[in-house]
Image (cartoon, rainbow, N blue to C red):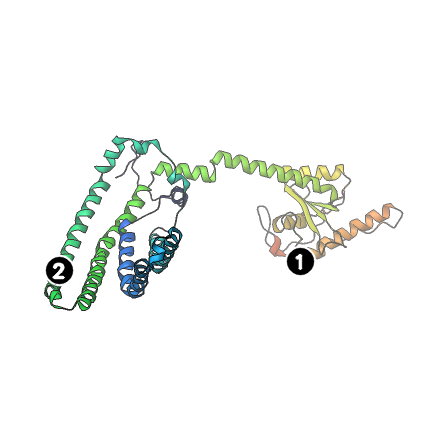
Amino acid sequence: MAENEDGQEKTEQATPKKQEEARNKGQVPRSRELTTMAMLVAGSVSIPLMGGPMVHQLGGVMRLGMQVERAKIFDPWAIIEILSQAIYQGFMALVPFLLVMLVTALAAPVALGGWAFSTEAMSFKAEKLNPLKGLKRIFAVRGLIELVKALAKFLLIGSVGAGLLWHYLPELMGLGREPVVSALAHTGSILSVSFVMLSASLLLIAAIDIPFQLWDHSKNLKMTRQEVKDEAKNTEGKPEVKSRIRAMQREVAQRRMMQEIPKADVVITNPTHYAIALRYDADKMAAPVVVAKGVELVAGQVRAVAMANNIPLYEAPPLARALYYSTEIDQEVPAGLYLAVAQILAYIFQLKASVRGGLVPARPDAADVPDEFFQGPGTNTGPHPKSDDEQIH
């Protein structure tokens, strides 16, 4: 089992955060055997396909350099121009092949760990120059595995090469009896096939190396249980810190709620356990909105702020409980409570008008509250008759 500096075993798989941090540092699974194999196979396949046009264009470059007029030989500027043309034509002849190799070199890593660009991985680290650590890497398990892979590649490619030589031996011995042009074409065919077979033999090495690299990368990123716990605390916050944050959030929300009470039209009470402040603007609102609510001590604060700002208190226990449990702050009252709330608000608005010289309105009978709105401790789920103790303060 892998252990960290504290001696704890790394038994836990890396968390997404740890994997992301490793990726930002350039630590992604990589298989050099996969990249080498892909480039060799791509090159061995591309050369036979592109070899004809490439040889033809390179032949033109040679002719351009050999067939120089005598007058131009003694002209330095003419020679420079011919050399420039030769370099350009030679480069253009190799561009298709070079593009294939470039695309292969960029695409091969994507098949395993994807692209990862990290400046941290390229930064200078003095510890990399430490010879002791270098020797440790050489004689570590990874160094042993790299040695085994090198020997395996040597034996595999050597065996495939010996088999190809044995297979093509009669043809190779007969090349001397063929015409020169035919012998060159035959030799090119043998070399092309042999190159493809030798490159394809590396598929076996890559097939073994890729799972090992994935396993090794996962093993190196493993964490101890304490590291997982510490990361969770740092990510989500310590319990006492989270509790303090929630308390502060509640305090801020309560202060904001208290600031909205002076804008309310009425506060419906239980009378002492519940308090719900409602506001309604017929020009801007489709239904009354709860601007503040609370139970016990908070309910007492809501009533105190309302009384300090001359906001009417209307005692309606069933409706107060129903509003508290069915509606959140800044939400409209449910449709099932429209009638009960509308009667109270109409009475409050008429009462305010009577203070300015109008007739005193009759206090409305409390509307029935549907059973579905009764929940929470201390409430009864059965039918609720109209309350006889509803009062206005």
Q: Position of residue 204 (x, y in %)?
A: 21, 56
Q: Where does label 2 land, which residue?
A: 165
Q: Which of 334 and 389 lies nearest the eye of the viewer?
A: 334
Badge 2 crowding class, 10 Å Cα cut-off, few under 14, some 14 to 19, many 20 or more, is some
- The residue at the point 14 percent across, 61 percent down is 164
Q: Where does label 1 land, which residue?
A: 335
Q: Position of residue 122 (x, y in %)?
A: 38, 40
Badge 1 crowding class, 10 Å Cα cut-off, few under 14, some 14 to 19, many 20 or more, is few
Q: Is residue 40 at least partly visible in the picture? A: yes
Mark in the foreground, 2 or 1: 2
Image label count: 2
Q: Give amino acid for label 1.
A: Ala
Q: Is residue 86 at least partly visible in the picture? A: no
Question: Horizontal placement of 4 versus 332: left or right?
Answer: left
- The residue at the point 67 percent across, 50 percent down is 319
Question: Horizontal placement of 34 versus 76: left or right?
Answer: left
Q: Position of residue 249 (x, y in %)?
A: 58, 38
Residue 323 is marked as none
- The residue at the point 23 percent across, 34 percent down is 135
Q: Give amino acid for label 2.
A: Leu
What's the CA distance linking mark 2 and mark 1?
A: 90 Å
Indicate the quadrant where residue 340 lies.
Answer: bottom right
Q: Which of 18 and 89 lies nearest the eye of the viewer?
A: 89
Question: Horizontal placement of 352 versus 217: left or right?
Answer: right
Q: Which of 203 and 260 lies nearest the eye of the viewer?
A: 203
The mark that comes first in sequence, 2 or 1, is 2
Question: Horizontal placement of 119 versus 208: left or right?
Answer: right
